[in-house]
Image: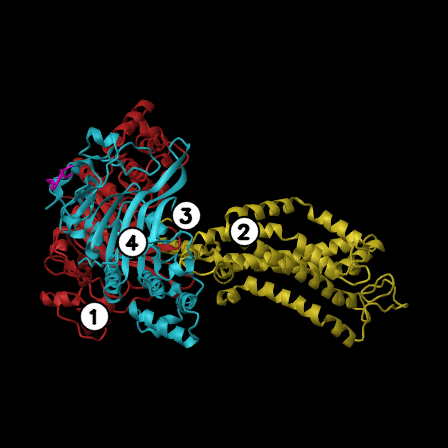
Chain colours: A cyan, B red, C yellow
């Protein structure tokens, strides 16, 4: 499903680090690398899923792409050009962010007409009032809030969570962007309406060629909608590759753990409860860990893992940050921690 | 199996400033829970699931009231049972924590932020057995924490010094303190990440297997329930619309809402295909339709559905409240579209 | 807005304020229409209690106190309104800018605000009013307003900070909206409640400050305000002689305006915080008691 164009990535992070001032457990000031030397390319018309748990740095990465945080190291490039120092308004003409919480991301005191209309006017000040209205109606229809006339003068408070999230998506579409960064757009919504928001993102990609970065902690929904999947752990990108490859043949022990832990409706209650591998919680980015950041939790840990940080190894179509794949061309799958749970 | 809890005809109403402003958040709730059983209650926002839980545990606060129904709790050897709704505070205290304990979604809000874990365990343990001395309490606390995989040193810590997953597990250990017959869990894993969620669920299953308590597990995430519950009740618009064995809900859901919900979870193992959610939004409890609350979103509805509210009937594989399914199974004929007061099989 | 006008406290408070505003606007005209003059001396009625001729009696020079009270409303209300407006505008401008911009700008502004807050405002007012002999009440209003904003600016800043961290302002920034438009159009409407409460307390503060200055003889002695009326009553020994009609009416007017603003603030509190609404809790208690009685149970709390 991946579409590749010869012209290179639309938006890319190159060895990007975002550093916050933080405190360690003892209260000493430390440097917290919420994103640590992350490189990620988004190509035209693809949906890339960025999967990780809380504290993995996935939202920080999205906000760095949206220029809410400035890179402390490395670069963000738009069509190959550095964006640091460039005016933000023209950047937002091309790159838009959809927020997680549809209850917080819309101004509750403004009508849908104002919310969408302002975004259109900022980027197309030449439009007349009636042209703006026509565009608002068109946007509402695009996100399936029909009849659009019924919605245009309503306030966000009279809409359900799913409808509000559609307004957020419509606002992002208002500028006719090249890239939409969707930060957990469905996690606050009821289960029964999540899929249709994902289907909407997919339709936007198909019909308008918009590149979408879908950030989520729900690996099953990531599989449902994405072409490529990137897995983050503790501020680092640990595995990436075509979605089906990553899901059916996860290489990094963390990806394997994540997949084994995800709820799967095709499993039901076992007659005998299985043994739980007692894994620690994810490493906080403020923790100092030498070598691979996953080593304290890794079932396949080796001496080398605590000594040296692994580089990215290419295994087939996947890229994995794990010493297991050093010099291995096509390795057998690393032992999964929860093999017995898989049907 | 012996009966542990029996909820009959329970209504919960949030009072408004006038009678027109009253909102019935739970209506005609009927279900039973056997000793040692895990019953899951799944529903979306405004389905009434959390309201039901606070009513059953008598933790509801104004303006919520229980105008009708009973929640009968059968203590070991007590065949009469006691109605928790009618019981006064003093009678309730006998059952709280020693027979029925609770695990809430936000552990941070449930644990006392200014006392160490040990003191909170001591409170719970002493309430149950006043004769315990300090050494016994420490020993018991350490044992309880060990059950959920927490090192005994953690008992000297404050809640904020623990990670989210640890706090949630500590709360489960606290719920186990008095060896209860029933643990009520309200979205106990919603605030933690997937890996920790899996561990906590496995731990609950293991402990339940060892200790034999029953669980009433409320969540919005049906996929979790499919993996851990014995039976599942599906709530929609304040009513139970389907209740059946977990296996049946997973493989052969009956109510159109359950089918829609079941289909709304993308799989990690099945081949990728286009799926659809359920169109439109969950209902507003203040403006419920006269007939089936799901009718506006249902793709199987017939004329009768908008006019006559379906009752929860035994349709063979499970209990379901759906005219179309009941007619298909030959349990009850499709009602005529004119509103009837009662439809009884 | 609808809910605002359905709250009795707000409605009564607003009605009282509206009444005084009307008096301030039309009072002098009404007085001359009645053929009265606040400065005219009635030699036949020196310091008389209320009568048919002089509804609120006269002062020691035989001036009609009703006419003075009505005409004086303009001075007091204008000083209060002007001072309140100036203080509120300053507080909103400084508070939102500082809170929204954050960083160095915020730290600098905050430092200045903190210094201003340590200034003893009333003492400063004294010095200025004493220095500018017989300052007109517009100047007094300016001084009161300009000294009265730092406290308000701090609370507006705190509110703005929390709004700034809400996703919707971040979302507006990532649509490319300009900073000043976000503050003016998107953020300030959320501060409506705080701003109106602040304006009302500044208004009352202005009226109090003007009266206090006049009472101490530092006001506009040529003008007629409630403050100068009380000051004259005091200087002519009305309080000692028990000439209540002399000082009580202007004092009551000031107190009633204070009461009206307090009513409005209480009403606003009830609207924005439904938990203060006591009738729901009472309804729940009644319902449970009825239910328990119907079931023949003992009523528990």
The residue marked by circle 1 belongs to what chain?
B
The residue marked by circle 4 belongs to what chain?
A
Residue B91 image offset from top left, x and y in percent = 32, 42
Q: Are labels 1 and 3 on one chain? A: no
Q: Secondary structure at mark 1?
A: helix
- A9 or A134, nearer to the observer: A9
Q: Is residue A334 magenta?
A: yes
Main SS category, magenta section = loop
Location of residue B294 (image quadrant): bottom left
Q: Residues within 10 Å of mark 4 (few under 14, many from 20)?
A: some
First in residue order: circle 3 vs circle 2:
2
The residue marked by circle 2 belongs to what chain?
C
- The residue tagged 1 is B305
Is any part of residue A196 visible from this angle?
A: yes
Span colored in magenta:
A327-336
Report the side of C99 relative to A166 (left or right).
Answer: right
Q: Nearer the viewer, mark 1 or mark 2?
A: 2
* Label 1 to label 4: alpha-carbon separation: 32 Å
Query: What's the residue at 45%, 63% (across, down)?
Result: A109
- A268 or C180, nearer to the observer: C180
Residue C301 numbered tag? 3
- The residue tagged 4 is A187
């Amino acid at each position: 499903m991946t579409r590749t164009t010869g012209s290179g990535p639309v938006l890319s992070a190159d060895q990007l680090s975002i550093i916050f001032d933080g405190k360690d457990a003892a209260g000493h000031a430390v440097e917290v690398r919420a994103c640590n030397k992350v490189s990620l390319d988004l190509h035209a018309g693809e949906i890339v899923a960025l999967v990780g748990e809380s504290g993995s740095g996935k939202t920080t990465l999205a906000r760095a792409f949206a220029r809410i945080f400035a890179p402390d190291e490395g670069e963000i490039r738009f069509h190959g050009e550095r964006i640091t120092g460039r005016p933000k308004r023209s950047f937002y003409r091309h790159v838009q962010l959809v927020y997680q919480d549809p209850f917080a991301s819309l101004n509750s005191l403004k009508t849908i007409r104002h919310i969408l209309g302002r975004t259109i006017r900022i980027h197309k000040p030449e439009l007349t009032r009636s042209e703006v209205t026509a565009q608002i109606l068109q946007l509402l229809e695009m996100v399936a809030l029909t009849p659009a006339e019924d919605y245009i003068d309503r306030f966000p408070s009279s809409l359900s969570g799913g409808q509000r999230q559609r307004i957020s998506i419509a606002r992002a579409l208002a500028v006719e962007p090249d890239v939409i960064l969707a930060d957990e757009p469905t996690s606050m919504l009821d289960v029964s309406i999540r899929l249709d928001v994902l289907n909407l993102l997919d339709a936007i990609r198909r019909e308008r060629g918009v590149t979408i970065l879908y950030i989520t902690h729900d690996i099953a929904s990531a599989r449902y909608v994405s072409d490529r999947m990137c897995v983050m752990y503790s501020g680092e990108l640990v595995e990436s590759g075509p979605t089906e490859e990553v899901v059916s043949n996860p290489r990094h022990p963390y990806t394997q753990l994540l997949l084994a832990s995800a709820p799967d409706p095709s499993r039901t209650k076992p007659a005998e409860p299985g043994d739980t591998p007692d894994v620690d919680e994810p490493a906080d980015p403020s923790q100092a860990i030498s070598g691979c950041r996953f080593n304290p939790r890794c079932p396949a840990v080796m001496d080398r893992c605590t000594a040296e940080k692994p580089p990215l190894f290419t295994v087939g179509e996947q890229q994995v940050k794990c010493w297991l794949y050093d010099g291995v061309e096509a390795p057998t799958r690393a032992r999964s921690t929860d093999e017995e749970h898989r049907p | 199996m012996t009966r542990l809890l029996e909820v009959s005809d329970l209504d919960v109403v949030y009072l408004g400033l006038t009678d027109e402003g009253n909102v019935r958040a739970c209506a005609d709730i009927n279900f039973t829970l056997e000793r040692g059983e895990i019953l899951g209650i799944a529903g979306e926002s405004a389905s009434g699931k959390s309201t039901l839980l606070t009513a059953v545990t008598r933790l509801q606060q104004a303006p919520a009231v229980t105008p009708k129904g009973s929640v009968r709790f059968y203590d070991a050897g007590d065949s009469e049972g006691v109605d928790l709704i009618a019981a006064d505070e003093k009678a309730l205290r006998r059952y709280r924590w020693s027979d029925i304990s609770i695990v809430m979604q936000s552990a941070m809000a449930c644990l006392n932020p200014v006392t160490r874990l040990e003191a909170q365990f001591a409170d719970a343990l002493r309430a149950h057995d006043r004769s315990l001395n300090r050494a016994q309490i420490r020993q018991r606390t350490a044992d309880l924490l060990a059950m959920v995989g927490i090192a005994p040193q953690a008992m000297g810590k404050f809640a904020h010094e623990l990670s989210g997953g640890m706090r949630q597990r500590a709360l489960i250990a606290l719920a186990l303190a008095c060896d209860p017959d029933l643990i009520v869990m309200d979205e106990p894993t919603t605030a933690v990440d997937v890996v920790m969620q899996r561990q906590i669920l496995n731990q609950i299953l293991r402990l339940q297997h060892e200790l034999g308590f029953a669980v009433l597990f409320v969540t919005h995430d049906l996929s979790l329930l499919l993996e851990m519950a014995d039976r599942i009740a599906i709530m929609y618009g304040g009513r139970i619309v389907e209740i059946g064995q977990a296996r049946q809900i997973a493989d052969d859901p009956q109510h159109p809402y359950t089918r829609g919900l079941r289909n709304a979870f993308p799989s990690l193992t099945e081949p990728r295909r286009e799926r659809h959610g359920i169109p439109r939004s969950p209902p507003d409890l203040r403006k419920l339709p006269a007939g089936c609350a799901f009718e506006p979103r249902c793709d199987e509805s017939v004329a009768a559905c908008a006019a006559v509210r379906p009752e929860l009937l035994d349709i063979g594989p499970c209990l379901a409240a759906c005219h179309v399914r009941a007619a298909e199974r030959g349990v009850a004929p499709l009602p005529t579209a004119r509103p009837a007061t009662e439809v009884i099989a | 807005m609808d809910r605002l006008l359905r709250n009795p406290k707000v409605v009564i408070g607003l009605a009282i304020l509206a009444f005084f505003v009307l008096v301030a606007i039309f009072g002098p005209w009404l007085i001359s229409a009645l053929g009265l003059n606040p400065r005219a001396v009635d030699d036949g009625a020196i310091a008389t209690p209320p009568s048919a001729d002089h509804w609120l009696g006269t002062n020691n020079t035989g001036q009609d106190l009703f006419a003075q009270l009505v005409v004086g409303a303009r001075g007091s209300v204008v000083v209060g309104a002007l001072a309140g407006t100036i203080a509120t505008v300053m507080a909103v401008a400084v508070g939102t800018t500082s809170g929204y911009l954050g960083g160095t700008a915020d730290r600098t502004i905050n430092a200045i605000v903190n210094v201003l807050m340590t200034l003893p405002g009333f003492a400063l007012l004294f010095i200025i009013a004493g220095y500018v002999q017989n300052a007109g009440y517009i100047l007094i209003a300016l001084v009161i307003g300009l000294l009265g904003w730092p406290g308000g600016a701090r609370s507006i800043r705190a509110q703005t900070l929390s709004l700034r961290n809400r996703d919707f302002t971040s979302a507006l920034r990532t649509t490319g909206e300009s900073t000043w438009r976000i503050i003016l159009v998107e953020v300030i409407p959320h501060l409506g409640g705080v701003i109106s409460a602040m304006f009302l307390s500044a208004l009352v503060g202005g009226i109090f400050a003007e009266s206090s200055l006049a009472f101490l003889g530092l006001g506009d002695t040529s003008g007629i305000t409630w403050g100068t009326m009380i000051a004259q009553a005091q200087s002519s020994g009305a309080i000692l002689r028990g000439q209540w009609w002399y000082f009580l009416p202007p004092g009551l007017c000031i107190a009633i305006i204070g009461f009206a603003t307090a009513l409005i603030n209480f009403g606003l509190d009830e609207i924005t915080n439904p938990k203060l609404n006591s009738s729901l809790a009472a309804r729940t208690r009644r319902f449970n008691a009825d239910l328990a009685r119907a079931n023949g149970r003992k009523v528990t709390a």
